[in-house]
Amino acid sequence: MSSEILQKAQSLRDYLVDCKRRIHRHPELGMQELRTAAFVRAELEKMGVEIQPLDTEVGVLGLIRGTKAGAGKVIALRADMDALPIQEAAGQPDQSEATGVMHACGHDAHTAMLLGAAKLLMSMRERFSGVVKLIFQPAEETLGGSELMIRLGCLENPKVDIMLGQHGIGEFATGDIAFREGPSMASSDTFSVTVKGVGGHGAYPHNSGADALLAAANCVTSLQGLITRQFNAVDPVVLSICTFHGGTAKNIIPEEVAFGGSIRCQTPESRGRIKSAMDRMIGSIVTGYNCTHELDYTYGVPPLVNDPAVVATMRSAAAKLLGEEHVKTMTQPRMGSEDYARYSEKIPASCFARLGIWQDGQAQPKFHNPAFVFDEKALPVGAGFFVQAVLEING
């Protein structure tokens, strides 16, 4: 038998589907979500949700105040709104009307689910205390939207106590919600290395005695040994060198060579060590070739860490919503990154859930793919989960 909250969410199915399809037909890239944000703002205003002023047109912050007696917690619920620069495959339902842009990661659905949750929460404010913040952010795909929203004060006035988010996942069936305690997704940092030597003729390398290309090539291979020999194998670190540039002709030893890539870490501890370890190893290698180097390291999003106590509370909420058999565990962390991690870094009492969207009998949905389809039967589940979570904490 369906729970009361799931039944309420199911009664909003037509609304949820309509919102998702409207957004899907008009996708917008990161920091360009003017139409989507305006739609969200208009829907919240229709519901009577208090709109908090923000110094941006591409993000929306709503506020719902519970009327049940008691102080209650300030709970933030987050959805992302941006699309991807992908041409949608022909014949998909509710085809994107924007050339070369589509919702291939489910952010249209995430936005619709948070709108549905807002609608339900507004209708039952007497059942919870405290405050619910609704964060509709831009630019998750470029990993910058959460930084903007935080800078604009979305976690303050009132200060958020508990942070919650969710994302569709193709590995679990529709109707399931999966959780993981502790490190769950990786940080995402990038680096560029410039190795400088002495240019010369390819026939007389000894005349220069400082081959930047050879030094850089040795750095590329040796850095993988840095990961396997200086970092714990059960605390994953992935270092991928994805660019290598040097030389202008086949008989000229280049004076300068550059390479770069990305680094993913599961824990703040490993992330805190990797830059200095890289710099030390690269320095020792290039010095042996009479070269010098410069390391430009850019910190992106931090690791996404779920608080075990909040996860336990969310598992309880999901079990009440769906039944214990539909509450799953993600046994392995993911090396991909999610800019929700900036919220959880600021608000450690945080949980990022994964919503199953795998339709029975269908192939697993592939994210960032032209043929990606988000199972709309999952929409009431996601909306209901947010509502049940609020009641679990402040009900």
Image (spheres, rainbow, N blue to C red):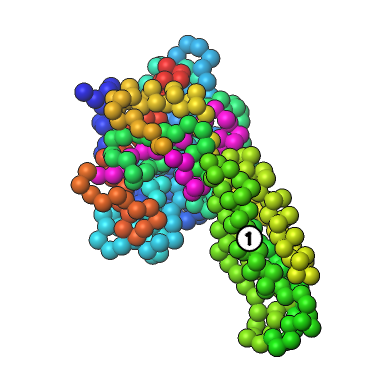
Q: Is residue 359 visible?
A: yes
Quadrant of residue 318 in the image? top left
- x%, y% of residue 301? 58, 46
49 or 192: which is nearer to us?
Answer: 192
Which residue position is annotated with label 1? 222
Residue at x 31%, y 62% (from the top left corner): 89
Residue 138 horizontal side relative to residue 12, left or right: right
223 or 81: which is nearer to us?
Answer: 223
Quadrant of residue 297 in the image? bottom right
The residue at the far top in this view is 69
83 or 365: which is nearer to us?
Answer: 365
Residue 347 belongs to the span the image colors magenta: yes
- x%, y% of residue 91? 25, 61
Which region is colored magenta?
A: 332-359
The amino acid type of the residue labelled 1 equals Ser
Q: Is residue 206 above or below residue 153?
A: below
Residue at x 76%, y 75% (from the top left corner): 210
Q: Is residue 127 above or below residue 249?
A: above
Circle 1 — which element? helix
Q: Quadrant of the N terminus?
A: top left
Q: Quadrant of the C terminus?
A: top left
Residue 206 horizontal side relative to residue 22, left or right: right
224 or 372: which is nearer to us?
Answer: 224
Residue 277 belongs to the span the image colors magenta: no
Quadrant of residue 379 in the image? top left
Query: Badge 1: few (under 14), some or many (20 or more) residues near its Cα, within 10 Å?
Result: some
Q: Is residue 34 visible?
A: no
Residue 280 horizontal side relative to residue 223, left or right: right
- x%, y% of residue 230? 64, 48
Residue at x 37%, y 43% (from the top left corner): 168
- x%, y% of residue 106? 38, 47
Residue at x 72%, y 63% (from the top left corner): 285
